[in-house]
Image: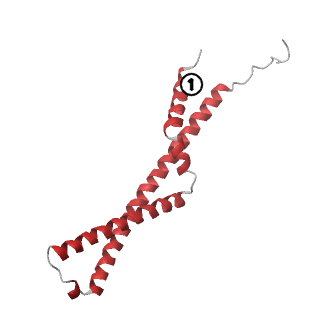
């Protein structure tokens, strides 16, 4: 008869293998710093792109709806404002991304640790020591 606890453990292991194992192995294929850096580079790129789009929409709105004279702009001041805005945006999203991706990495590590504990427990239960005094060659 199969032990109830073994069935539960095997079900948990199968569920993990089906749902999370491939994703976790890809994440844990990197060191934490490398994983966070890699993810943050992508985040920064898209945040920078989004910030530029927001600025472009704002300038187009000011030019066409408020009839802003482009030739009367102080380009130095406008450029400093743009750089400050994009810099603050990148710093904020870098901090948010670092916290988020560190959390994801930690969750993957915990799931993998739990998987190893279940595997060891299942292996220990399946490999039982032979009783003393019985020789395997005697039949």
Q: At 34% from the left edge and 72% from the top edge, which residue is drawn? A: 86
Q: Is residue 73 above or below residue 26?
A: below
Residue 103 % position (x, y): 44, 52
Residue 46 % position (x, y): 39, 63
Q: Is residue 124 above or below residue 4?
A: below
| Residue closest to the eye, 105 or 83 | 83
Chosen colour scheme: secondary structure
Q: At 50% from the left edge and 47% from the top edge, which residue is drawn? A: 108
| Residue closest to the eye, 133 or 6 | 6
User: Can you name the residue that lies furthest to the front here?
Assistant: 64
Q: At 85% from the left edge and 14% from the top edge, which residue is drawn? A: 138
Q: Is residue 116 above or below residue 36?
A: above
SS class of the residue under badge 1?
A: helix
Residue 75 % position (x, y): 28, 86
Other residues around mark 1 within 10 Å, as few (<14) / some (14–19) / many (≥20): some
Q: At 31% from the left edge and 82% from the top edge, which residue is drawn? A: 80
Where residue 118 sits, quadrant-wise, is top right
Residue 33 % position (x, y): 53, 61
Label 1 sits on residue = 6
User: Can you name the residue that lies furthest to the right here?
Assistant: 137
- Left or right: 74 with respect to 119? left
């Amino acid at each position: 008869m199969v032990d109830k606890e073994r069935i539960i453990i095997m079900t948990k292991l199968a569920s993990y293998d089906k749902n999370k194992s491939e994703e976790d192995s890809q994440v844990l294929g990197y060191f934490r710093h490398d994983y966070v850096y890699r993810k943050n580079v992508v985040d920064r790129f898209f945040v920078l792109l989004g910030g530029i789009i927001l600025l472009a929409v704002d300038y187009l709105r000011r030019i066409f709806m408020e009839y802003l004279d482009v030739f009367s702009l102080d380009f130095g001041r406008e450029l400093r404002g743009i750089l400050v805005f994009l810099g603050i945006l990148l710093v904020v999203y870098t901090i948010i991304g670092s916290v988020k991706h560190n959390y994801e990495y930690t969750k993957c590590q915990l799931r993998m640790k739990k998987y190893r504990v279940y595997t060891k427990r299942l292996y220990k239960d399946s490999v039982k020591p032979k009783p003393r005094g019985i020789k395997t060659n005697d039949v």
